[in-house]
Amino acid sequence: MSNNDAMMTSELVRGSQLKAAAPATRLSGLTEAEIKALARGMMEFLKNDFAPELTQTIELLLHARLRRIDERLKTLEGAAYLTDAGIWNAKSDYDVGMVVTFDGSCWVCQKWHSREQPGKSDLWRLMVKRGKDGRDAPR
């Protein structure tokens, strides 16, 4: 807003039509009606002169945030997760992240395979080792 525009706005605010619109309560030398008119003028000024810049800034911020969310989602989707596959079965195929129980222990599949018994190769990783049977516990 140029100095000339500011002077014109000030003249409009102090115009006779605005002074009659509200009681003459003074605040910093202006009536309530003048303050409201200034606020409306500023809002219109901001909307017309700054809206494209504000919209562009908001869009840039949103795009940056969405990129971060998208990157995080790709990381999470690419991460291995565990799936309960029950008791190990020699006739089943197993994929990465499948968890089976075998001989009292819990095993996690490390690579896709079929029919490989847990504990016989690096295709399985021991997750929970078999504990004592508890028969020696006091009753």
Image (tube, rainbow, N blue to C red):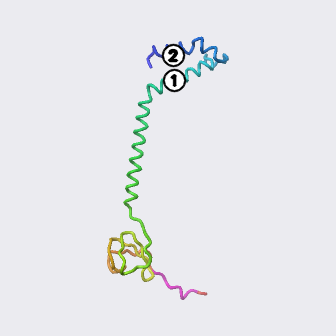
Q: What residue do we see at 45% from left, 13% from top? A: 4
How many numbered marks have been drawn onto this rendered protein structure?
Answer: 2
In the image, 23: left or right of 112? right
Q: CA distance from mark 2 to mark 1?
A: 10 Å
Residue 111's image quarter? bottom left
Q: What residue do we see at 42% from left, 45% from top? A: 65
Does residue 39 lie above or below 71 as drawn? Answer: above
Callout 1: helix, strand or loop?
helix
Q: Amino acid at mark 2?
A: Thr
**Residue placed most toward the observer, 59 or 120:** 59
Residue 80's image quarter? bottom left
Q: Which residue is mark 1?
A: 42
Magenta-drawn stretch contains 100: no
Q: Which residue is mark 2?
A: 9
Q: Position of residue 38 (x, y in %)?
A: 55, 21
Does residue 33 lie above or below 98 as drawn? Answer: above
Residue 49's image quarter? top left
Mark sitting earlier along the chain (2/1): 2
Q: Position of residue 91 (x, y in %)?
A: 36, 80
Does residue 26 lie above or below 73 as drawn? Answer: above
Magenta-drawn stretch contains 132: yes
